[in-house]
């Protein structure tokens, strides 16, 4: 399998090359040259497989030519061995025709573990084969950072530097990152928003001398391997609910568009998905686009669901590329204009094509609290703010005869203040994190300036080299 950039100027690369590169040299995102296809019989043959084996089968076509199936299976088994639920991604029914898929049973209690635990092992495997080292830089709105750190801590060939927006994550989210004191881990709190952090990461990749000096790589969902590793759980729940002999819809709380893009990718591979429902908070750019073709940025507003406090959804570029029939020049023109003006003039026919599959729903903080309360009262289910938004989107767009699965993306214990405000209950942290509030923290606060952040990344890499 080979990969090309959404902007058309970067060299075509293998899966291993794309894994290590993260962002394409031209600022675009890598996409597979073609979509692997599974027949109905092949989907049926995956029913009932243990999750690691199913994941290896789904991901294998994307890694073809770089990583053997046997190696991939071994890595998947190791990646999911630490999850605290035997099913890895259990399904829970909360209403008639409406299910929740819990993606938070990994070590950092968020869906990002589903990809990150595998990515850390993929990096280790490829870097060992090549006898190389890389510096991973990433931006997080709350969960990506801790998942990347947990997956990569202590790995000799990886230095990990994570940028988070100062004061804009929950305390649990921050402490899960900043209390990891391994030599190869560094945390930077940026005086700004997640979009500022994301822009800084992209600027570091665009700074060719710095990128070469530090051998930069990425674990954000700009890295295609992250998307590939998220496809299997959509397959798992769809098969459990009757696919390929029955359509399934998914509702996904999303900020950076990566999680729901993985569901879209599963559909490209032949999984019968009827509808994809996008859940947003008050930072509702994706919902505004889907409902009214309004792709315009506004100031990022803090919310009860901080992992979705995003106005620039990086992975939308991948969908746009496909909706434009892979016209890289048109994609580049629209993305460049969007970054320059904060508004994207998506052609009506492209918007209409998106609307055939995607729907959007946005909830403000009060409506999110109401949804948390409703789920607790009517279904005895504790949903964190992000997951509650996903359930609300699934309920709105649910269709008779077609089960809808809402993605539960984080454990409610990660958001104690929001849960206490909504239902008067603070869910307990699992035993492994019970002393989180007593652990030592280590991070630097820096201004939103590229030169200062690059210096901080150099210091983090130098510390690991010692």
Image: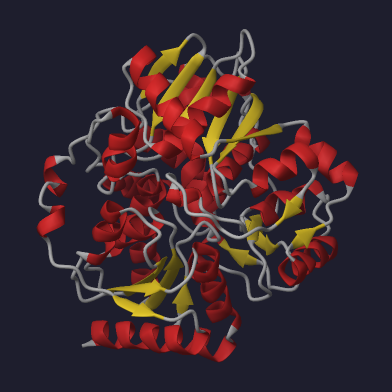
Q: Residue at x 60, y 44 (%)?
A: 261
In-front residue for pair 49/363: 363
Q: Residue at x 45, y 50 (%)?
A: 307
**Coloration of the structure image:** secondary structure
In-front residue for pair 426/320: 426
Tell me which corner region of the image, top left, top right, bottom left or bottom right, holds residue 380: top left
Q: Position of residue 184 (x, y in %)?
A: 26, 75
Q: Position of residue 319 (x, y in %)?
A: 70, 49
Q: Residue at x 75, y 72 (%)?
A: 340
Q: Is any part of residue 8 visible from this angle?
A: no
Tell me if 59 is positioned left or right of 14 in this view: left
Q: Relative to 49, does residue 446 appear above or below in the rendering?
A: below
Which quadrant, please, contains the C terminus?
A: bottom left
Q: Is any part of residue 285 visible from this angle?
A: yes
Q: Residue at x 53, y 26 (%)?
A: 392
Q: Relative to 414, does residue 299 appear above or below in the rendering?
A: below
Which quadrant, please, contains the N terminus?
A: bottom right
Tell me if 437 is positioned left or right of 383 in this view: left
Q: How many marks?
A: 0
Tell me if 421 is positioned left or right of 198 in this view: left
Tell me which corner region of the image, top left, top right, bottom left or bottom right, holds residue 427: top left
Tell me if 115 is positioned left or right of 155 in this view: right
């Amino acid at each position: 399998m080979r990969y090309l950039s959404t902007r058309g100027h970067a060299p075509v690369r293998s899966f291993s090359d794309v894994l290590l590169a993260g962002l394409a040299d031209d600022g675009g995102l890598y996409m597979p040259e073609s979509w692997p296809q599974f027949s109905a019989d092949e989907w049926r043959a995956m029913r009932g497989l243990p999750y690691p084996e199913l994941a290896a089968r789904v991901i294998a076509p994307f890694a073809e030519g770089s990583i053997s199936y046997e190696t991939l299976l071994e890595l998947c088994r190791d990646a999911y061995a630490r999850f605290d639920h035997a099913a890895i991604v259990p399904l829970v029914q909360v209403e008639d025709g409406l299910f929740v898929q819990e993606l938070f049973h990994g070590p950092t209690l968020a869906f990002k573990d589903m990809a990150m635990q595998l990515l850390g092992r993929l990096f280790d495997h490829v870097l060992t084969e090549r006898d190389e080292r890389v510096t991973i830089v990433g931006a997080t709105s709350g969960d990506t950072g801790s998942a990347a750190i947990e997956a990569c801590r202590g790995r000799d060939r990886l230095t990990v530097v994570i940028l988070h927006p100062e004061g804009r994550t929950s305390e649990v989210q921050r402490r899960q990152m900043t209390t990891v004191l391994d030599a190869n881990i560094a945390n930077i709190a940026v005086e700004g928003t997640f979009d500022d952090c994301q822009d800084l990461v992209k600027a570091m990749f665009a700074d060719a001398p710095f990128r070469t000096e530090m051998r930069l790589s990425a674990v954000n969902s700009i890295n295609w391997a992250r998307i590939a590793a998220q496809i299997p759980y959509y397959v798992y729940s769809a098969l459990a609910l009757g696919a390929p002999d029955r359509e399934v819809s998914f509702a996904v709380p999303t900020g950076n568009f990566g999680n729901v893009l993985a569901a879209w990718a599963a559909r490209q591979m032949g999984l019968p998905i009827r509808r994809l429902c996008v859940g947003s908070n008050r930072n509702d750019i994706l919902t505004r686009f889907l409902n009214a073709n309004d792709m315009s940025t506004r100031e990022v507003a803090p919310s009860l669901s901080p992992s979705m406090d995003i106005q620039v959804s990086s992975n939308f570029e991948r969908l746009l590329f496909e909706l434009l029939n892979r016209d890289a020049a048109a994609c580049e023109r629209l993305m460049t204009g969007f970054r320059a003006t904060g508004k994207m003039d998506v052609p009506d026919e492209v918007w209409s094509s998106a609307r055939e599959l995607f729907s959007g729903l946005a909830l403000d903080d009060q409506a999110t609290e109401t949804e948390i309360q409703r789920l607790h009262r009517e279904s005895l289910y504790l949903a964190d703010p992000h997951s509650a938004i996903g359930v609300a989107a699934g309920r709105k767009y649910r269709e008779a005869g077609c089960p809808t699965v809402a993605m539960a993306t984080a454990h409610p214990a990660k958001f104690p203040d929001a849960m206490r405000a909504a239902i008067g209950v603070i869910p307990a942290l699992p035993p492994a994190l019970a002393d989180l509030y007593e652990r030592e923290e280590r991070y630097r606060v820096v201004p939103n300036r590229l030169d200062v952040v690059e210096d901080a990344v150099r210091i983090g890499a130098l510390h690991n080299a010692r």
